[in-house]
Image (cartoon, rainbow, N blue to C red):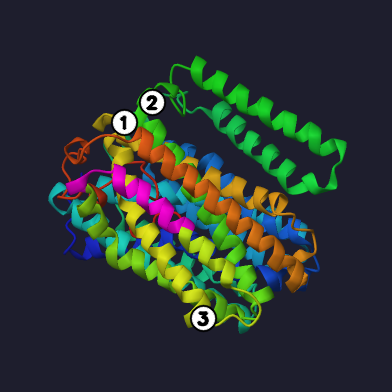
Amino acid sequence: MADVRVASPQGKWLLCTTVLGSSMALLDSTVVYVALPRIGEDLDTGLAALQWTVNAYMLTLAGLILLGGCLGDHYGRRKVFVTGVVWFAVASLLCGLAPTAEVLIAARALQGVGGALLTPGSLALIQASFHPDDRGRAVGLWAGFGGVGAAVGPFLGGWLVDGPGWRWVFLLNVPFALLCVPCALRHVPESDGTGRAEAAPQGRFDVLGACLGALALALVTFALIEARTGTAVVAVTAVAGMAAGVAFVLVERARPDPMMPLDIFASRRFTAVNLVTICSDGALAGFFFLAVLQLQVVAGYSALAAGTALLPTTVMMLLFSARSGELAERIGPRVPLTVGPLLCAVGMLLMLRVGPDASYPVDVLPALLVLGLGMVTLAAPLTATVLASVDTARAGLASGVNNTAARAAGLIAVGALPLVSGMSETAYRSPGAFDTAFRRAMLVCAAVLVVGATVAFTAVRHLASDVARPTGGPPGGAMAPAPPGAGEKSTTGRRWTA
């Protein structure tokens, strides 16, 4: 029964547990960027291995997150959430003990599987457990504490890397899990109704679709990362990746219960907003991957200083995302979805000033403030418009598709940007070479954001009154409670720090 109150002891424990679980996945994503140069130095590996350290996690998370939400609906959300936490902790332990880059990459892929199980479950447990009158407040608290975790991540990662070492970036998840699992088993009720195993008929899992989608992303990502070698294997892998993508579309079209029903893209606005998501999330993922390296390799910042330097963007998201959502409700989504990417593009162009011995207040901070303003302008309207572009009954599906599109875009961006910017395998060890490639990459990211702004301006033409709020939520589509299975969609943190 959905009758838990926020003010009750059980409600507080439930919130604490879900925030702690989702924060494991969130923190691990943010802190790894800061640790990359030290990982490469310690394991004596090249840029491709660093790309895979990021992408192995993103790959399995993006490919399996929709399936993870379905498993929670089918077998019980608490059960799948706890399984995900334990899985994530064991994989984190393997990451922390990894003797080689190859072992670390494999363990990161396993981490992504755990993240795909626990991430949808954290918000779905709130939706399924709290009383409808308290649900909006509970989601707001979950999002707010998650945003604080996102803000702490880069600072904590820098402190760990400069202090006890990069391995503690991963080992820190083990005590988190030891706290989270007993709390979940004791204080979090198992989902009833659609959450019971018997509530969903057998055979509904689109395992083939999930595997084909993940395989397509994996093969294309491999081809992008290894393209600089120019071998026949790369060409074969690229063709196989495209073939797997076509097979995924054919399977989803043929199945009566697909993981991603293609008819959802019949909504012109939904399709347009997902294209904006791909452009914005791809560019921002590429930016955060390379900016931390630029600050350490070229500007000479320590890991702690580099992580702390990026805090203004997250702080601005925490402070102003709700107001941005309210503004979008009054004026409609078209202007924010157009202006937001353009501001982000300007912020990235300002990063061209960051070179050797860059001054933080003069060179770095202005770029991050403009970038943060663009992210604030874009985040809440993007989430609200995705949910408003389809019928309320399909809001969970729409949110999951958008989340998957965002993660896939980030995956491709991290794989492609070093290639298109001419970054060599050892560039991160040469300040001059990395600086040159970074400047090219920022121009590419800015161009992609301009494409996203153009799509928003030409395709999102609906007025503010057309942006419907999700049923049962509080005023403000940006802060309305997401439906079960919506995944990690808080407007304070969004996915750019996850």
Quadrant assignment, res 245: top right
Q: Secondary structure at mark 3?
A: helix
Determine the residue positioned at 56% across, 76% down. Answer: 306
Residues rendered magenta in the picture: 329-345
Relative height, residue 153 to residue 70 (above, below): below
Instruction: Provide the secondary structure element on which disc 2 rests.
Output: helix
- Name the residue at the left extreme: 133
Q: Which mark is residue 92?
A: none
The Cα atoms of the two marked residues, 1 and 2, are separated by 9 Å
Q: Amino acid at mark 3?
A: Tyr
**Visible in this render: residue 226?**
yes
Residue at numbered disc 2: 264
Q: Amino acid at mark 2?
A: Ile
Query: Which one is in front, 460 or 320?
Result: 460
- Which numbered marker is on residue 360? 3
- Between residue 50 and residue 17, name the one nearer to us: 50
Mark 1 in CB contact with mark 2 (< 8 angstroms): yes
Label 2 to label 3: alpha-carbon separation: 45 Å
**What secondary structure characterizes most of the magenta part?**
helix
Q: Which residue is mark 1?
A: 394
Residue at 42 percent across and 45 percent down: it is 453
